[in-house]
Amino acid sequence: MDNNIFIGSGEEHIMLFQNELPGMSYINFTGFKPYYSRFLPQYFALLLKIPLLLYHIIREHFILKKLIRKYSIDIVISDNRFGLWNKKVKTVYITHMPLIPLPGALRFLEIFGILLHRVIIKKYSLCFIPDLPGEPNLSGRLSHGIKLPENVRYIGILSRFISNSSSPEENNIKTDRTTVILSGPEPQRKILKQKLTAVLKDQPAPTAVMEGKPGKISGIVRAGNISYYNHLPATEMKEMIISSRTIIARSGYTSIMELISLNCSAILIPTPGQTEQEYLAGYLSEKGWFNTIPQDEIKEGVNLTSNTATWPHEMTRQSSNLLEEALKELLEKHHKDS
């Protein structure tokens, strides 16, 4: 069956998709961009932006109506965008955290976020959670141990590398290289880069820094033992990761899923004040799957050594079955109502 697939995103992410998926149709569909402060915790900075968030939710909801009519769209799958539901077509909302974690003193307020998220999820035909439904899992209390709406489906671990990821036995050819995977918004991305550069520039082993900037001119900039890459295609990025002795990354959920799919552990450095990343780094380090270190502790003499992978390898195999089942249900719902 022939299907037309449209990818809607902001310009920066469209550049990434175009590099990996040439020939697709793209729509410039910018969403809400959270404000990240150099000093304020993320949850507090976001509270100040709630009026702007509500504006974007309403705006994108009405933009979607126009896009559905213009392109005769049948199914909409959106990643954490609250306003992309529509009663005339099947819509899917993807999130890994129906519970938004708050720091200890404010944890009693999490229930209000859960209830609000339930209202949003119920507006969609289905909600996909990229995780496993029981133990082991990656998201912990972010999506487990709470009452979820009936339209929620766990779809396993997602990764651009998962379809052709190497087996654990093939991932044991390591160099002495340290690979740094930068991600997330400024100014914290730049702060982390500066801190790690100061520590790693005098190390005898080579370091590769993947800056994650697909819109920039590709190429390599070398400074001493450090090589900086604006962007690497998925196949080259995969080879860089699996052949590295030490990997350093943010504890963003996408980064964690991709590392798991490649059977590679890492040192996780959560973005300061981003409670989701702080929780995930702590949760997964307690399992012994990753090491973690706060950003403000990165200084000369710090030990930057990755764990070896210890999680059950069947996690990725189980994931493909869960995703297939969820997509089958989505298509059945669409065909039933069309």
Image (cartoon, rainbow, N blue to C red):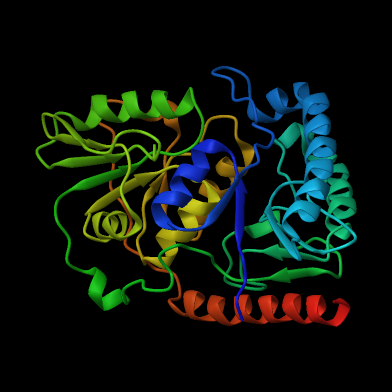
> Image point 63% across, 38% down: which residue?
275
Q: Position of residue 186 (x, y in %)?
A: 49, 25
Describe residue 214's horizontal placement relative to residue 10 as left or right.
left
Query: Does the rendering let one see residue 136?
Result: yes
**Image quarter in which the N terminus is found:** bottom right
Look at the picture and state if 83 lies above or below 35. Answer: below
Task: Please name whichever residue, 166 or 213, is drawn nearer the observer in this view of the structure.
Answer: 213
Outermost residue toward the front?
A: 70
**Image quarter in which the C terminus is found:** bottom right
Task: Please name whichever residue, 105 or 109, is drawn nearer the observer in this view of the structure.
Answer: 109
Task: Please name whichever residue, 35 or 285, is drawn nearer the observer in this view of the structure.
Answer: 35
Q: Position of residue 137 (x, y in %)?
A: 59, 67
Look at the picture and state if 323 lies above or below 62. Answer: below
Query: Does the rendering let one see residue 288?
Result: no
> Image point 88% across, 62% down: which residue?
88
Outermost residue toward the top?
A: 39
Look at the picture and state if 235 lies above or below 136. Answer: above
In this rendering, the count of numbered labels is 0
Describe residue 195's horizontal placement relative to residue 170 as left or right.
right
> Image point 39% across, 44% down: which residue?
249
Q: Position of residue 181 (x, y in %)?
A: 36, 43
Residue 168, picture quadrant: bottom left
